[in-house]
Image (tube, coloured by chain):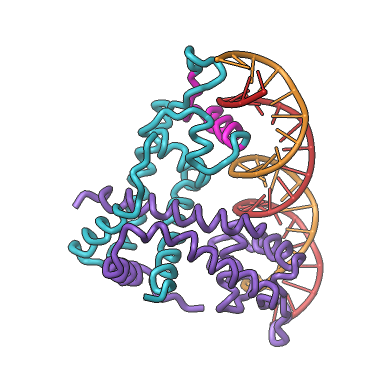
Chain colours: A cyan, B purple, C red, D orange
Amino acid sequence: MADDDLIDPLVQVCFEVIGVLTVVGAAHDLSLTQVRLLAILRNHRPTMSQLADHLGLDRSTISGLVDRAAARGLVERVTNPDDRRSARLTITAKGRKLATAGAADIATRLAPLFEPLTDRQQQTLAGLLDRMVPARAG
Amino acid sequence: MADDDLIDPLVQVCFEVIGVLTVVGAAHDLSLTQVRLLAILRNHRPTMSQLADHLGLDRSTISGLVDRAAARGLVERVTNPDDRRSARLTITAKGRKLATAGAADIATRLAPLFEPLTDRQQQTLAGLLDRMVPARAG
DNA sequence: TATTGTTATACTCTATAACTATA
DNA sequence: TATAGTTATAGAGTATAACAATA
């Protein structure tokens, strides 16, 4: 098949989805990157370096990002007694609450995108997408 | 079905795709927004306001964006003789060349994502995604 | 020496508010 | 008056380079 028959609609859908994440984030004064940060911290406690690798950003960028989120009381640095150079990041109760509310908003705002698909088609889509995401350690 | 069974992998895949667009853009000194700009201008000649609406950005943001792209010779403002307030944006030959090369890079870098799927599954995916993108005027 | 994280710096992206020119 | 676009301003996101602390 012509690549574009798949790539074009995929990229289009991605921009729609990212657009939803961006506006929902903005409604809570969160940038797209802050949304990702909270989403990750819901299930993980990475070090700054691990976070940088995962997000594909420089460590210095992460420092600023975490500074701003910490200033809002959304995340916390927890120093590691075994290696005092490194710090683990954790989400606060306030951050978790915001993340949970945001996830619900996102689900609601994403729903219209799935509307053209039958339940059966949505299941098929979920299966295909699931196969595309590599199992990720962390 | 549980929403998250669809939303989670969809969002994951979207971040993968956006990540590819970001790194390919960066390899050509283009931000993600500049990549989108060139992608749109390959097929359209919008006014500044139309572009702002389409990208979901403020008109003032578009001004700066276009300034920087124009300074690199990638796009041009063409004033409309019928309404001298407005300007249509066009891609230059240089911009088109860059966009074409970028699109090829993107296809190459996106390919590993599809690898877990059979050709038949890729066709199915393309069909489902296609149904999700609204026909857009412009 | 190597690694973890921060700081200083500079540029891009973004929105708000105020503005100019045209309609 | 209303609309198209720009400019001034301020803050967030980003990378590079240089740095301090720890290993």
Q: Seen in the image, is B8 located left or right of residue B55? A: left
Residue at 41% in and 33% down: A41
Q: Where is residue B36 drawn, in percent x and y?
A: 56, 64
Q: Is residue A72 above or below residue A80?
A: below
Q: Seen in the image, is B24 located left or right of residue A14? A: right
Residue at 75% in and 70% down: B73
Tell me the chief SS of the magenta region.
helix
Residue at 38% in and 50% down: B12
Determine if residue B5 is in view: yes
Q: Where is residue A71 drawn, in percent x and y?
A: 56, 28
Front residue of B31/B20: it is: B20
Front residue of C21/B13: it is: B13
**Magenta stretch: residue B74 in it?**
no
Q: Quadrant of residue D22?
A: top right
Front residue of A60/B105: it is: B105
Q: Is residue B9 above or below residue A70?
A: below
Q: Where is residue A108 drawn, in percent x and y?
A: 32, 53
The segment highlighted magenta reads A61-78
Q: Quadrant of residue A68?
A: top right
Q: Where is residue A128 drawn, in percent x and y?
A: 28, 58
Front residue of A92/A81: it is: A81
How many dots with numbers? Answer: 0
Q: Residue furthest bottom?
A: B82
Residue at 66% in and 75% down: B91
Q: Quadrant of residue A17?
A: bottom left
Determine if residue B86 is in view: no
Q: Seen in the image, is B17 located left or right of residue B78? A: left
Q: Is residue D23 above or below residue C22?
A: above
